[in-house]
Amino acid sequence: MKKKTIDAFNDASIKVPFIIPEITRNDKNVVSNALNSRLLTDGPKLNKFESIFAKFTGAKFAVGVSNGTAALHLSLKALGIGKGSEVIIPDLTFVATASSVLLTGATPVLVDVDEDLNISIPSIKKSITARTKAIIPVHFAGKSCKIRQISSIAKKNHIAIVEDCAHAIGSKTNNKHVGTFGQSGCFSFYPTKNFTTIEGGMVITNSKNIADFIRSARNHGISKTLTSRFAKGRPWDYDVENPGYNYRLDEIRASLGINQMKRIKKMNSLRKKVANYYTEKLGNINGIIVPDKSINAEHVHHLYVIRITEKYSITRDTLFNKLLKSGIRTSVHYKPLHMFTTFKKMAKVSGSLSNSKNAYSQILSLPIYPSISKKQQDLVIHNIEKYEH
Ligand SMILES: Cc1ncc(COP(=O)(O)O)c(C=O)c1O
């Protein structure tokens, strides 16, 4: 029998995985119990998960969907965005931010980021045209964008905001949860995120119209829930007011979400501890820029991204390889969108994207998760200290 490894890809040499999802015995029991239910989708666990999430974020409505991309796609559809529209997004984000725009038929407009890797305000201003219908700011790594400034630009120009909060479960600005500043906020519960339902997502909004649209559109455009259809009368008596999708979040995932939500504050505070320890130990290394030096706001540390500058003895790519050889997985978030074949063809580039290009050659995401041990962190730190000039 093959020896069990701690690495997701079964590499026995890995001592520090890039991510370990937090699945407890209790999570497994909850999932197992949910499997005993007769109603496996479109049921009460989803309603409960949604109301807990709405309360947690302070939004009026929360609507669960199958993943974060669906959350973005349906938010844009709810705002009537489609062919002929332009949607401003940062160049440095996961591909889903752009794909969701393409799925509507609209054009993503790629703009530059700031030093902190969040969308740049001057770049947004420069890229607004008569066709601009929305901005999707991404709260990168779990730190809020300059969302108040973005809101005022959007208001002035009659543009909607769909916040991409995939990294930012629990992240706040001025005590207000991200995702509640724009027309909607979109979350992902993919296994790498601050909590997981394996696959899963959520839209939060204060607009009843948007919430109603998404509730129906996630379920083929059907006007009633499964429970209400069977509660009385003829279950087939429903209407389809708009063409919809199958973007449902099932009861198993919803039950896992409810259970994980009980631990989100604890998990986020453990992440903060991990981030603070990295910052304390790596902050004075010549040539390394740690996030807390260039980022001055509180965040939920979905990612811990350092920058490897020319002052360091080796390049980012060499460091990546050296760390891997020492059993440490790291990654880069992200390869900028303008470099992908699809977006070269289908997106519009605004400006030089110089910060995004420069960041791409320097950034490295270190392992961060609640269960990482001090010993594992020390191994990462030691291997980065080793190459200081
Ligand atoms: C910034 C960003 N936006 C959108 C998504 C899409 O989420 P999902 O993978 O759940 O569709 C992700 C996550 O993977 C993400 O990191």
Image (spheres, grey):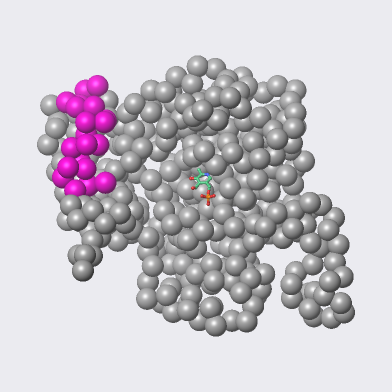
Residue 69 drawn at (x, y percent) = 58, 48
The residue located at (63%, 54%) in the rendering is 203
Residue nearest the observer in this picture, 222 or 183: 222
The answer to whether 135 is drawn above or below residue 376 in the figure is above
Quarter of the image containing the N terminus?
bottom left
Quarter of the image containing the C terminus?
top left
Instruction: Evaluate whether residue 328 shows in this view.
Output: yes
Instruction: Evaluate whether residue 258 shows in this view.
Output: no
Asked if residue 319 lies in the magenta stretch, the reply is: yes
44 relative position to 296: left or right: right
- What is the count of numbered marks? 0
- The range drawn in magenta is 310-329
Q: Indicate the quadrant where residue 151 lies.
A: top right
Residue 162 drawn at (x, y percent) = 64, 42
Residue 20 drawn at (x, y percent) = 33, 58
The residue located at (58%, 32%) in the rendering is 89
Q: Indicate the quadrant where residue 107 lies.
A: top right
Residue 67 drawn at (x, y percent) = 57, 54
The answer to whether 161 is drawn above or below residue 168 in the figure is above
The residue located at (73%, 30%) in the rendering is 85
The answer to whether 270 is drawn above or below residue 323 in the figure is below
The residue located at (49%, 21%) in the rendering is 353
Asked if residue 376 lies in the magenta stretch, the reply is: no
Which residue extends farthest top? 352
175 relative position to 152: left or right: left
Which residue extends farthest front? 1
